[in-house]
Amino acid sequence: MRISARADYAVRAVVELAVRQDDGPVKAEEIASAQDIPHKFLEGILTDLRRAEIVLSRRGGGGGHRLARDAARITVADVIRAVDGPIVSVRGERPTGLSYTGTAEPLLPLWIALRANVRRILEGVTLADLAADRLPEPVRRLAAEPAAWENP
């Protein structure tokens, strides 16, 4: 599985909003600067996040961006889906839309299991968790495994 630059930037942007949620609307320029995200790229990401009702925006002098709902009700999966679509796909298709025959038949349950595990992690972590630097215990346990940090 690959996390696109777009998804990485989107998650970083909304975590920035979550951390600053009590400060009022945050300008895109401030988010871009704080997270080292190219401003023009961020504008497109924020548009996708607005369409997905994750972010609200207001124009004008006191305007900017803020989360559309409480950070504890927005998961990392929500953000990734908003900017990239389905979390796990095979050749651009959802695993449930695939079919295999013959010796390739075991691939379908493999892809489904992969999707289930990725979803379990990404749907189990909220923006509030990230903003508070408080990852859920199962995620912390996985990340603490030495093999998780190795690149085979």
Image (spheres, rainbow, N blue to C red):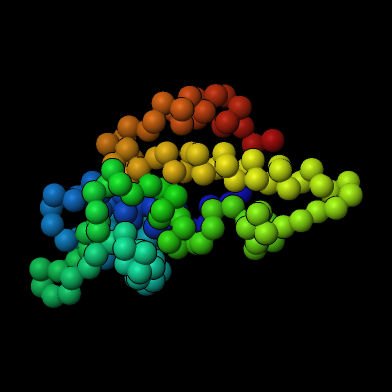
Q: Horizontal placement of 94 versus 86: left or right? A: right
Is residue 130 visible from the viewing direction of this image?
yes
Give the vertical position of 120 relative to 6 (above or below): above
- The residue that appears at 46% across and 43% down in the rendered structure is 122
> Number of numbered discs present?
0
Q: Residue furthest left?
A: 62
Is residue 35 visible from the viewing direction of this image?
no
Give the vertical position of 50 relative to 105 (above or below): below
Q: Quadrant of residue 54?
A: bottom left
- Along the viewing direction, whichever of 114 and 19 lies nearer the viewer: 114
Q: Horizontal placement of 105 versus 40: left or right? A: right
Location of the C terminus (image quadrant): top right
Q: Residue furthest bottom?
A: 60
Q: Horizontal placement of 116 versus 62: left or right? A: right
- Residue 47 at x, y = what percent? 35, 70
- The residue that appears at 27% across and 47% down in the rendered structure is 71
- The residue that appears at 59% across and 52% down in the rendered structure is 88
- Residue 70 at x, y = what percent? 23, 49
- Residue 85 at x, y = what percent? 51, 62
- Residue 35 at x, y = what percent? 33, 54
- Along the viewing direction, whichever of 118 and 26 lies nearer the viewer: 118
Q: Horizontal placement of 6 versus 70: left or right? A: right
Q: Residue furthest right?
A: 102
- Along the viewing direction, whichever of 59 and 115 lies nearer the viewer: 115
- The residue that appears at 18% across and 70% down in the rendered structure is 58
